[in-house]
């Protein structure tokens, strides 16, 4: 049929066309490069070489070259999957039938779905299977032009049988080495391996498309670990070890460096709050990455509050500039929206927009647990494309005790897979390490043989005992005589400064307002509010004010939600913590007398807040359950038993046993769904769906479902949320203390046409975003206060200054002032 083309591009230099063979080869080479480091090059290459076979038809060529038909009207994804189904896998004697079937399954779901999202291999209710659509009736459907594709394959010079046979041999080797004998859930691992292969294909396809218009559009970042280690060690040599705390911190850091020679595996870094685990874990990661030639380091943080702080610390320690290509901060999806239908990329602008979706290809990534989990649980290519870049890396999870309990079993299987199959080293960091391997023992966590990176003596641990926990059982209202606000103010006056940590944003706002009405500021206190209603730049400014005040000894009261409990390096004279789980109390205590400023231990007060002020706690089940255990079990025990230490290991073990007992029995750790299923089962063997399929579709055959994959990828991908009902990232109007104004950045974005420059601006706008819940987003949109500022990048902006308070952040119910023009 003559030359076949994959895409066209009208450039300033003229009209260009990319041949189909060039696109298939280019995509295949990229996919192979992505997967080679973990030994899966042939599998990824086969998917990439065959993914666009459907373009080898007259219908597609007429659409592409002559504009016949609407965008996306010519189906071209399924034909490659049909070819995989028809291929011979017998070129290698050692490949057995089950591996051949598994290879077919993995290649078919990836190829057929490369412009959308991974399917449910068995649909809800068991009435149909994705693989039923690989049969002769579909192949004979005229919409696919499959007979024409087969006749044109020779002109492309593709040996489909050899590609599939090589892929099957490759998959068999990896399966035998990494999956066959694994102690964890084998079917879950196969689902993750399917996602990995799909990720390689999608990213390679998008990159090759973008490179056709601009060969420099896909930068390659090679990590220079020697240079980064030199910068780190130079900085580290300046740190003092002149106090007992600093001496133990230095020893923790040294042990982390010494542990870097250990092989790839899952490790724990368990050190007390204030032990310097952020820099110590980075030191381990840098030396380990050099030792084992890892591609990148990914630092995963639980709360948005410390992402910018951590990234800024890394830049300082490693001598990196704000625009240095070594480090990527990715914690907001603002400007990275997903279209409803991922149809064929028909123009350069769209190709480059899709390329802008963060790929995590830089040597150092700072991101959030939300981004990590939602990437791993995703089914859409726009999110999953970065998944393959988690392979052959070091991933550090800071404050792992903050992991949402509904995803605990999913998390264990994910990190098991990353470590065993993708050669990624995992570090679990916390001061209150939950023994994840002992929680729900039906789901294993395959820790390394010697999992603790650091061992501390009792004497060293005693150095970090800087506080006493003082509890009371009588609930306090926030306002009124003898209320929490008065209690906080009294403790602040006694100690010079006070941090008050509450459970809800509504509590934080009310407590701040009540302290203001009590005259805290007229008494000389700086009053600071912190919550996720504030954008990152606003929180950073507030935290900078807190640090300056506490460092100089100025009187200050800071009211915060739990976001301040994870890694925020501040030290107060006292802390008042609204009753919550033990882990939260220990973390809050870590912000008191943090550096041993007082030789005498300072008091941390645990105070239950009245139910009337914590009505919203019913929506935050983990915090509510933690509060109940503390107030009904541990606090009464501590009041009756003077020797019972709420900061000790016995208390933590008792708390974790009580907290997880009912959750394990109720399958609450497997991300339960409203229909009675759970994400863990749906992404594994999917027993219920298999049974329904056999009963509904093949009632006479108990083994009717013959395929290796039965995962419900799409169902989980569309239903999974780390924070339920959280919707869009919205840019707010705010000017940072450094002089950066989101309004000016938005103006630059509106005037910019270069997609790469737009991406740079959007990255800077991350610090000016707030994540809104569904109800608030809808409410503000209906009032006309949220607009779509950029169509290409789906960027939403809160246009109202009245709904963004300079003390509290987004206030959805604020009244809009009249505007006069």
Image: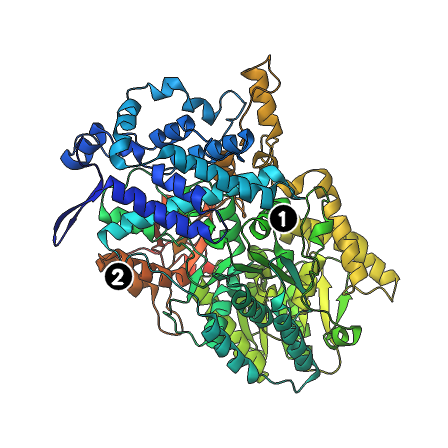
Numbered badge on residue 412: 1
Which of disc 1 and disc 2 is earlier in sequence? 1
Residue lying furthest top: 700
For residue 268, side relative to residue 788 (left or right): right
Q: Position of residue 403 (x, y in %)?
A: 61, 53
Quadrant location of the C terminus in the rendered image:
bottom left
Quarter residue 241 falls in: bottom right
Residue located beneath label 2 in the image: 747
Badge 2 element: helix
Badge 1 element: helix
Name the residue nearer the viewer: 742 or 749: 749
Name the residue nearer the viewer: 599 or 670: 670
Name the residue nearer the viewer: 14 or 573: 14
Evaluate whether residue 318 shows in this view. Answer: yes
Q: Residue at x 65, y 42 (%)?
A: 181
Q: Position of residue 201 (x, y in %)?
A: 39, 44
Evaluate whether residue 806 shows in this view. Answer: no
Name the residue nearer the viewer: 374 or 31: 31
The crowding category of the residue bearing disc 2, from other C-alpha atoms within 10 Å (few below 14, some 14 to 19, many at least 20), is few
**Mark 2 vs mark 1, CA separation in Å:** 44 Å
For residue 672, side relative to residue 540 (left or right): right
The crowding category of the residue bearing disc 1, from other C-alpha atoms within 10 Å (few below 14, some 14 to 19, many at least 20), is some
Q: Position of residue 84 (x, y in %)?
A: 40, 31
| In the image, residue 330 above or below residue 97 | below
Numbered badge on residue 170: none
| In the image, residue 382 above or below residue 748 | above
Labelled pair 2, 1 in contact (Cβ < 8 Å): no
For residue 319, side relative to residue 75 (left or right): right
Q: From the viewer's perspective, is the residue at label 2 or at label 1 nearer?
A: 1
Q: Position of residue 36 (x, y in %)?
A: 45, 51
Quadrant location of the N terminus in the rendered image:
top left
């Amino acid at each position: 049929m003559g030359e076949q083309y994959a895409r066209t591009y009208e450039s300033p230099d003229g009209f260009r066309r990319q041949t189909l063979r060039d696109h298939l080869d280019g995509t295949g080479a990229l996919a192979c490069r992505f997967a080679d480091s973990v030994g899966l090059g042939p599998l990824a290459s086969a998917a990439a070489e065959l993914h666009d076979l459907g373009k080898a038809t007259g219908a597609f060529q007429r659409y592409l070259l002559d504009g016949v038909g609407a965008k996306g009207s010519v189906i071209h994804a399924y034909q490659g999957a049909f070819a995989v189904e028809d291929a011979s896998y017998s070129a290698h004697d050692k490949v057995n039938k089950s591996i051949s079937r598994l290879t077919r399954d993995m290649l078919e779901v990836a190829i057929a779905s490369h412009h959308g999202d991974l399917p449910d291999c068995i649909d809800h209710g068991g009435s149909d299977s994705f693989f039923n659509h690989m049969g002769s009736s579909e192949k004979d459907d005229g919409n696919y032009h499959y007979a024409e594709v087969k006749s044109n394959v020779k002109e492309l010079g593709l040996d489909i049988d050899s590609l599939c046979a090589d892929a099957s041999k490759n998959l068999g080797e990896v399966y035998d080495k990494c999956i066959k004998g694994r102690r964890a859930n084998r079917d879950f691992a196969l689902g993750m391996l399917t996602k990995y292969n799909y990720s390689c294909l999608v990213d390679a396809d998008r990159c090759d498309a973008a490179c056709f218009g601009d060969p420099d559009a896909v930068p390659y970042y090679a990590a220079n670990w020697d240079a980064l280690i030199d910068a780190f060690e130079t900085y580290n040599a300046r740190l003092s070890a002149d106090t007992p705390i600093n001496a133990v911190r230095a020893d923790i850091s040294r042990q982390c460096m010494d542990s870097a020679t250990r092989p790839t595996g899952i490790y724990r870094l368990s050190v007390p709050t204030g032990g310097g685990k952020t820099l110590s874990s980075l030191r381990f990661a840098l030396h380990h990455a050099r030792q084992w030639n890892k591609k990148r380091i990914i630092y995963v943080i639980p709360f948005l509050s410390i992402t910018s702080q951590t990234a800024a610390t890394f830049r300082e320690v490693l001598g990196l500039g704000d625009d240095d290509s070594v480090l990527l901060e990715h914690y907001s999806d603002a400007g990275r929206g997903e279209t409803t239908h991922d149809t064929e990329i028909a123009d350069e602008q769209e190709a480059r927009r899709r390329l802008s979706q963060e790929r995590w290809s830089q040597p150092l990534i700072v991101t959030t647990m939300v981004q990590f989990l939602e990437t791993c649980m995703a089914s859409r290519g726009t999110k999953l494309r970065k998944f393959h870049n988690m392979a052959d890396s070091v991933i550090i999870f800071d404050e792992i005790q903050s992991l949402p309990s509904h995803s605990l079993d999913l998390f264990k299987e994910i990190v098991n897979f990353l470590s065993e199959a993708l050669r990624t080293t995992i570090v679990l960091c916390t001061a209150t390490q939950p023994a994840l391997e002992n929680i729900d023992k039906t789901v294993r966590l395959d820790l390394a043989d010697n999992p603790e990176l650091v061992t501390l003596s009792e004497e060293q641990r005693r150095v970090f005992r800087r506080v006493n926990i003082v509890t009371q059982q009588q609930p306090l209202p926030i306002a009124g005589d003898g209320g929490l606000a008065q209690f906080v103010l009294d403790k602040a006056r006694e100690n010079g400064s006070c941090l008050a940590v509450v459970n809800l944003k509504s509590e934080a706002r009310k407590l701040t307002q009540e302290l203001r009405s009590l005259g805290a500021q007229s008494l000389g206190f700086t009053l600071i509010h912190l919550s996720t209603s504030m954008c990152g730049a606003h929180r950073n400014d507030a935290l900078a004010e807190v640090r300056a005040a506490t460092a100089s000894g100025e009187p200050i009261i800071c009211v915060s939600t739990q976001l301040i409990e994870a890694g925020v390096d501040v030290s107060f004279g006292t802390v008042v913590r609204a009753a919550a789980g033990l882990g939260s109390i220990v973390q809050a205590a870590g912000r008191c007398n943090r550096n041993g400023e007082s030789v005498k231990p300072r008091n941390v007060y645990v105070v239950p807040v009245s139910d009337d002020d914590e009505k919203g706690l019913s929506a935050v089940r983990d915090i509510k359950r933690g509060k109940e255990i503390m107030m009904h079990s541990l606090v009464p025990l501590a009041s009756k038993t003077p020797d019972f230490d709420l900061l000790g290991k016995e208390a933590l073990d008792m708390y974790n046993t009580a907290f997880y007992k009912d959750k394990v029995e109720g399958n609450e750790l497997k991300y339960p769904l409203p229909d009675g299923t759970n994400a863990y089962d749906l992404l594994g063997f999917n027993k219920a769906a298999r049974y329904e399929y056999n009963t509904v579709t093949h009632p006479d055959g108990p083994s009717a479902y013959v395929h290796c994959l039965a995962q419900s990828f799409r169902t989980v991908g569309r239903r999974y949320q780390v924070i339920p009902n959280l919707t869009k990232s919205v840019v707010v109007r705010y000017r940072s203390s450094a002089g950066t104004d989101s309004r000016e950045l938005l103006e630059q974005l509106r005037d910019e046409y270069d997609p790469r420059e737009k991406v740079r601006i959007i990255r800077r706008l991350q610090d000016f975003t707030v994540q809104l819940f569904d109800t608030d987003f809808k409410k503000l949109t209906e009032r006309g206060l949220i607009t779509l500022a950029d169509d290409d990048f789906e960027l939403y902006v809160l246009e109202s200054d009245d709904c963004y308070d300079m003390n509290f952040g987004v206030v959805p119910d604020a009244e809009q002032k009249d505007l006069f023009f």
